[in-house]
């Protein structure tokens, strides 16, 4: 099975998630923010082929209820996620805004002055991106 960029973009639009993941580093009072692209599905053959195409791995997640299907998850962080999103951007429809924001976030994070920025300004900037993503990824009807 050959996975094209168009197919992959459609799959990401329907079964994927583009987000900024917030977490604390151990003994650090400031939250870290990382770009992440995830694709989750129950169909092993497709997940295996997508993982191969993206040159990454997938994990198997068993479910609490024995009647539920097994999930397979691909999780791609940071710069690798940005490169994939740049390639898929022309074909994305549903997640186009998230992809553009994610690329912008990662480019800014890669700038040399990002880490030398005033700590408060740095945290406000990260939080502003996180809030924008939270609004874009909110469940429910778009208004």
Image: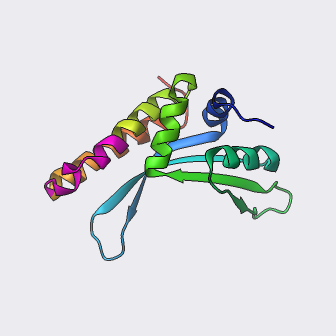
Q: Residue at x 56, y 26 (%)?
A: 92
Residue that protrudes farthest toward the bottom in the picture: 27
Q: Residue at x 62, y 45 (%)?
A: 54
Quadrant of the image occupied by residue 106 = top left
Residue 111 covered by magenta stretch: yes
Quadrant of the image occupied by residue 13 = top right
Dominant secondary structure, magenta? helix
Q: Could you tell me if residue 106 is visible in this image?
A: yes
Q: Position of residue 63 (x, y in %)?
A: 75, 61
- State the residue in front, 137 or 37: 37
Quadrant of the image occupied by residue 101 = top left
Q: With 124 as the anchor, is 31 left or right in this view?
A: right
Q: Residue at x 24, y 46 (%)?
A: 125
Q: Is residue 53 above or below residue 29?
A: above
Magenta residues span 106-118
Q: Position of residue 73 (x, y in %)?
A: 66, 53
Q: Position of residue 40 (x, y in %)?
A: 67, 48
């Amino acid at each position: 099975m050959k996975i094209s960029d168009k197919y992959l973009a459609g799959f990401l639009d329907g079964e994927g998630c583009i987000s900024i993941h917030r977490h604390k580093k151990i003994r650090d009072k400031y939250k870290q923010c990382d770009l992440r692209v995830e694709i989750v599905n129950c169909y092993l053959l497709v997940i295996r082929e997508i993982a191969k195409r993206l040159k990454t791995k997938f994990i198997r997640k068993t479910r609490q209820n024995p009647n539920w299907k097994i999930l397979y998850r691909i999780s791609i962080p940071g710069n690798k996620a940005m490169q994939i999103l740049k390639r898929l951007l022309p074909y994305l429809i549903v997640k186009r805004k998230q992809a553009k924001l994610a690329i912008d976030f990662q480019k800014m994070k890669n700038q040399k002055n990002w880490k030398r920025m005033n700590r408060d300004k740095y945290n406000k900037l990260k939080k502003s991106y996180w809030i924008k993503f939270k609004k874009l990824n909110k469940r429910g009807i778009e208004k």
